Amino acid sequence: MNEKLVRIDKTDRRILDCLQQDGGLTNQELAERVGLSPSPCLRRVRALEDAGVILKRVTLLERKALGLSLTAVIMISMDRHIPERFDEFQRQIEACPEIQECYLITGHDADYMLKAVVPDMDVFQELLLNRITRIPGVSGVHSSFVLRRVVDKTELPLGYIV
């Protein structure tokens, strides 16, 4: 991977900090918080977007308020480690709205770690038995259920940016 690091100064970092806390800020509000006038603030935000630092802005929803009370962590093992198997698995997992995160991992007896959010155990069972385990190549599944979200944040640690 040839990823080029983007140069971020203190003002850019303040902008990113503010947007990570509240992506719905208007440009005027953001400019006031970081000590810029609106035009230079907007130029900086657009430059951060163009550089691929700001990918998108989203609204975070409360799961339980929407009846999505069950969060599961699912470890998936694949039968063969060939690109076609992984590509097909990833394609089908991307199509599942219940899957919030999917990681190809090392260091476990699993190849993938998924996070799924569903209303209840019945829906989880349908997701697992009728969709995930039917994906070609899935040879093992181990599920754990979240009792409490201790840390659940989206903000990146910007303190490492010089």
Image (spheres, helix red, strand yellow):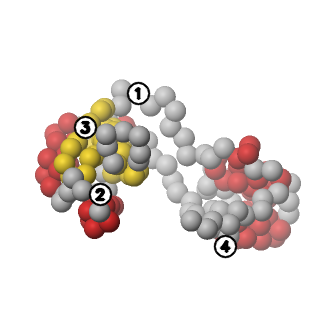
Q: Secondary structure at mark 1?
A: loop
Q: Which residue is mark 3?
A: 142
Instruction: Say which residue appears at 51% left-offset and 53% top-offset.
Output: 59
Residue 21 shows in this picture = yes
Q: Position of residue 32 (x, y in %)?
A: 81, 54
Q: Earlier in the sequence, mark 4 or mark 1?
A: 4
Residue 153's quadrant in the figure? Answer: top right
Q: Amino acid at mark 2?
A: His
Spatial CA span between label 3 and label 1? 19 Å
Q: Earlier in the sequence, mark 3 or mark 2?
A: 2
Q: Which residue is mark 1?
A: 148
Q: Nearer the viewer, mark 3 or mark 2?
A: 2
Question: How many neighbours does mark 3 have within 10 angstroms: few (below 14), some (14-19), or many (20 or more)?
Answer: few
Q: Secondary structure at mark 3?
A: strand
Drawn side of residue 40 relative to residue 52, left or right: right
Observer-nearest of 101 and 26:
101
Q: Are marks 3 and 1 in contact (CB under 8 Å)?
A: no
Q: Position of residue 106 (x, y in %)?
A: 41, 45
Q: Earlier in the sequence, mark 3 or mark 4?
A: 4
Q: Which residue is mark 4?
A: 50
Q: Which residue is mark 2?
A: 81
Instruction: Say which residue appears at 26% left-offset and 36% top-offset.
Output: 143
Q: Nearer the viewer, mark 3 or mark 4?
A: 3
Spatial CA span between label 4 and label 1? 37 Å
Q: Are marks 3 and 4 in contact (CB under 8 Å)?
A: no
Q: Nearer the viewer, mark 1 or mark 2?
A: 2
Observer-nearest of 100 and 109:
109
Q: Earlier in the sequence, mark 3 or mark 1?
A: 3
Q: Earlier in the sequence, mark 1 or mark 2?
A: 2
User: Where 147 falls versus 128 (above or below)?
Assistant: above
Question: How many neighbours does mark 4 have within 10 angstroms: few (below 14), some (14-19), or many (20 or more)?
Answer: few
Q: Amino acid at mark 3?
A: His
